[in-house]
Amino acid sequence: MKARFAGVKPWGAPGDYSDLELPEGGFLDLHNDFGLLGVTLVGHPKVALRLEFGNSRRGRFALEFHDVGELVMQQTVVSSDGWYGEPEADPDGIDSITYYEYGAELPPVFEVQSSSLRLKFRAWEVILRPFAG
């Protein structure tokens, strides 16, 4: 089955995405323009995975995945590996989000890849949530 999308144009499956097309036009480039600031898993009232992105000039937003299941998270490096002095002001973005569907009854699968993190999970809904300010 297909995922439901809100705040972002729906994706076709299968596909790899690093740009989020906005319904009103334009896009958000998750690879070049926005760094991945955080990953949060919420368990109540339903399981949601939140990826928080930011850019010092363009602001912050969250890409949320709702009704998440079968989550696998792999951190490929320790965050301080290779740091000499202060961390970069703007963290790396993600390489891509792969979206694919299996059968009529199962939730779609998402794979998020970055230079230091890999997430794989199923989810029924994707919501773009801008932050005020």
Image (cartoon, rainbow, N blue to C red):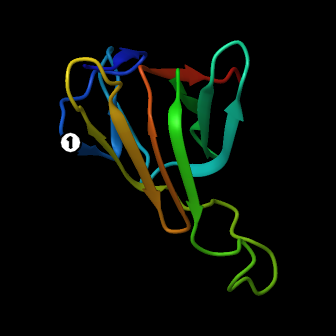
| Point 66% across, 24% down: residue | 131
Q: Amino acid at mark 1?
A: Gly
- Residue 76: image quadrant is bottom right
> Which of the two residues, 97 or 128, is positioned nearer the viewer here?
97
The number of numbered badges drawn on the structure is: 1
Left or right: 27, with 63 as reference point: left
| Point 60% across, 33% down: residue | 49
Q: Quadrant of the C terminus?
A: top right
- In the orientation shown, which residue stands out farthest toward the right? 85
The percent coordinates of residue 14 (x first, y second) are 18, 39
Q: Quadrant of the N terminus?
A: top left
Tell me: residue 99, above or below residue 123: below
The percent coordinates of residue 114 (x first, y second) are 48, 61
| Point 39% across, 47% down: residue | 111
Q: Secondary structure at mark 1?
A: strand
List the residue tagged with mark 1.
Answer: 15
> Which of the two residues, 35 or 114, is positioned nearer the viewer here?
114
